[in-house]
Amino acid sequence: MDKKTEVLLLKTGRNQFKRVNINDIYLLGADNVYTIVKLSCDDSFLATKPLKYLEKQVSKYNNFCRINRSTIVNLDFVSEFTLNTHPIVLLENKERFKVTEQYKNNFLKKITNKDKK
């Protein structure tokens, strides 16, 4: 799959849709039955689908990883992470997110294998 040209079509309203380059998404965050989509250009919007639905949409891309119940990050935007008793992911824009125990092993596997490909 050519990541550079992959585009998601996300519903943002009753009759509104937004085309988003998959590489521009750095975070998907749960907001009740909606999802906050944050983009690398400091733009964000609300998609009218739940996080679980969008997780299926981005699951074919190896650079996305769920780190807790309400957050999926694009690993390309992770600048640091800690693995102490409270694991934290720091994104390039300095936002911090907790990595919960349930998702920690998958995150470690994906982030450590990411640069080997």
Image (tube, rainbow, N blue to C red):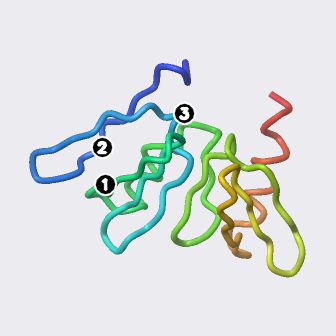
Residue 88: percent from the left, percent from the top? 76, 69
For the residue marked with disc 1, what is the amino acid? Answer: Ala
Q: Which residue is mark 3?
A: 23
Among numbered discs 2 and 1, the one appearing first in the sequence: 2
Residue drawn at (49%, 47%), measured in percent from left and top?
42
With respect to residue 10, does 51 lie above or below?
A: below
In the image, 59 versus 8, the foreground residue is 8
Question: Which of the 4 quarters of the picture holds residue 82?
Answer: bottom right
Residue drawn at (31%, 70%), measured in percent from left and top?
33
For the residue marked with disc 2, what is the amino acid? Answer: Leu
Quadrant placement of the N terminus: top right
Q: Which mark is residue 94?
A: none
Residue 31: percent from the left, percent from the top? 38, 70
With respect to residue 2, does 14 lie above or below?
A: below
Quadrant placement of the C terminus: top right
Among numbered discs 3 and 1, the one appearing first in the sequence: 3
What SS does tag 2 mark? strand
In the image, 29 versus 58, the foreground residue is 29
Q: Is residue 2 left or right of residue 95?
A: left
What SS does tag 1 mark? strand
Q: Which residue is mark 2?
A: 10
Measure the C-alpha gap from mark 2 to mark 3: 14 Å
What SS does tag 3 mark? helix
Question: Which of the 4 quarters of the picture holds residue 7?
Answer: top left
Pointer 2 with pointer 1, Cβ within 8 A: yes
Measure the C-alpha gap from mark 2 to mark 1: 6 Å
Local packing at callout 3 (Cα closer than 10 Å; few below 14, some 14-19, many 20+) is: some
Q: Which residue is mark 1?
A: 47
Q: Is residue 13 left or right of residue 23?
A: left
Extreme-left residue of the structure: 15
